Image: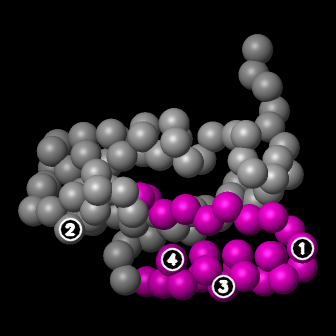
Amino acid sequence: MTTRLPGTLVTFEGPGGVGKTTITELVAGLLDADGVPVHATTQPSRTPLGELARHGTYRDMAFACLCAADRHHQLATESSPPWPRARSCSATATSYRH
């Protein structure tokens, strides 16, 4: 049985350089100003593993595996409830490299 968690997940997806992180920061700031708790993330994450995926020279399957490992780590350490404030909006900027 699936348990529904409180909150809303908002994602901004697209290729690198189109402003996903910028819009995530703007939306998070507006929601926070209105008193809505926000947990903003990015994928790949800002952890060492995410930075390796983000700035490394890996392509194809190696890049996919790095991103999958980073996502798994992020879910286990950052994105899974309980968040500091349970009723939150999680805004995520997801980047894809071609």
Front tag of 4 and 1: 1
Front tag of 2 and 4: 2
Front residue (pair 57, 38)? 38
Residue at 79% from the left image edge and 25% from the top image edge: 3
What distance separates the C-alpha of mark 1 from that of mark 3? Answer: 14 Å
Q: Quadrant of residue 80?
A: top right
Write down the residue under mark 3: 26
Q: How many marks?
A: 4
Asked which secondary structure carries label 3, the reply is helix
What distance separates the C-alpha of mark 3 from that of mark 4? Answer: 10 Å
Horizontal side of 68 relative to 5 (left or right) equals: left
Q: Is residue 59 above or below residue 98?
A: above
- Going by the numbered disc 3, the residue's amino acid type is Leu
Quadrant of the snapshot with the N terminus: top right
Mark 3 or mark 2: which comes first in sequence? 3
Q: Is residue 41 above or below residue 70?
A: below
Front residue (pair 65, 78)? 78
Write down the residue under mark 2: 55
Mark 3 or mark 4: which comes first in sequence? 4
Write down the residue under mark 4: 20
What distance separates the C-alpha of mark 4 from that of mark 1? Answer: 22 Å
Mark 4 or mark 1: which comes first in sequence? 4
Is residue 32 rendered magenta in the image?
yes
Q: Looking at the rendered structure, which numbered label has been put on residue 35?
A: 1
Residue at 86% from the left image edge and 68% from the top image edge: 36
Query: What stretch of residues is rendered in magenta?
Result: 18-45
